[in-house]
Image (cartoon, rainbow, N blue to C red):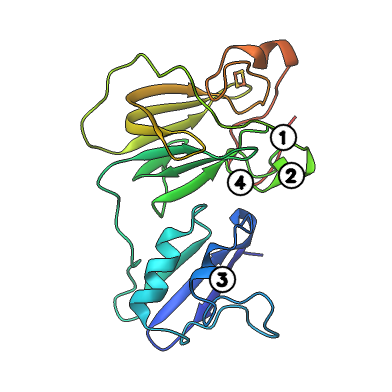
Amino acid sequence: MSRIHRYDGAEVVVEFDLARCIHTGDCSRDLPEVFNTKRSGRWVQPDGAPAAQIAHVCADCPTGALRCIDKASGQAMDSPPKYNTIQIIADGPLYVHAKMRVNGKPEPGYRAAFCRCGTSRLMPYCDNSHRECNFRDDGKVTVPLPSPAGSQGPLSINATPGGPLMIEGPFTLLDAAGQVVCESSKAALCRCAASKMKPYCDGSHTAIGFNQSQDINGTKQA
Ligand code: FES
């Protein structure tokens, strides 16, 4: 069964990837006429607001769980950001806003949340497991990356089996307070939770025997 739910309206289709939703509540706060989890029946009402407003809220979904498709053209109503960003979320995932390839495949949208706690069942994406395992990291960063900033372009994100999230391509790293840490073009970011230099990998994944595969189909492999 597909994990993507479709909500058809007159002008737009809203696609919702339940597995990637971590219930930040942004959509229901910003546009409750359309997104309302307390409503009985369909929680998404794609005719509840102008199409442009729905598209804007979907494009801002930080995990990429929501997408808005123009019914007439069949095209997604979003666009890549001018600058790629990676933001650390305190006690939570990494939010990436970029045109990106993940484990070699083009990401359909421009936002995704990546696991930092090491326990997601949707690796390398976040599935909210950090709450269950009580992951703690304040998201403060004191050491900027040494590698130079790159020019504009897409990001390549690869989850190395049993190791970090490897980032290649130009990006700005933001701490949990939204402050710019640095601009860079290469990073190895911890996804096992054990690093003492978060958000960077310090090799601790070897010591703890971290064994998450790079599978992106929602299957946790030993
Ligand atoms: S992935 Fe966590 S220390 Fe390397």
First along the sequence among labels 1 and 4: 1
| Residues tagged 3 and 4 counted as in contact (Cβ below 8 A) | no
* CB of mark 2 near ligand 1 (< 8 Å): no
Q: Is residue 174 left or right of residue 37?
A: left
Residue 3 vertical placement versus 33 (above, below): above
Q: How far apart are marks 2 and 3 (CA)?
A: 21 Å
Q: Say which amino acid is labelled 3.
A: Ser
At numbered mark 3, what does the secondary structure look like: helix, strand or loop? helix
Residue 203 vertical placement versus 175 (above, below): above
Which residue carries the number 4 mark?
217
Mark number displayed over residue 28: 3
Q: How crowded is mark 4: few (under 14 residues within 10 Å), some or many (20 or more)?
A: few
Which residue carries the number 2 mark?
131
**Residue ID at (68%, 40%):** 120
Which residue carries the number 1 mark?
135
| Residues tagged 1 and 3 counted as in contact (Cβ below 8 A) | no
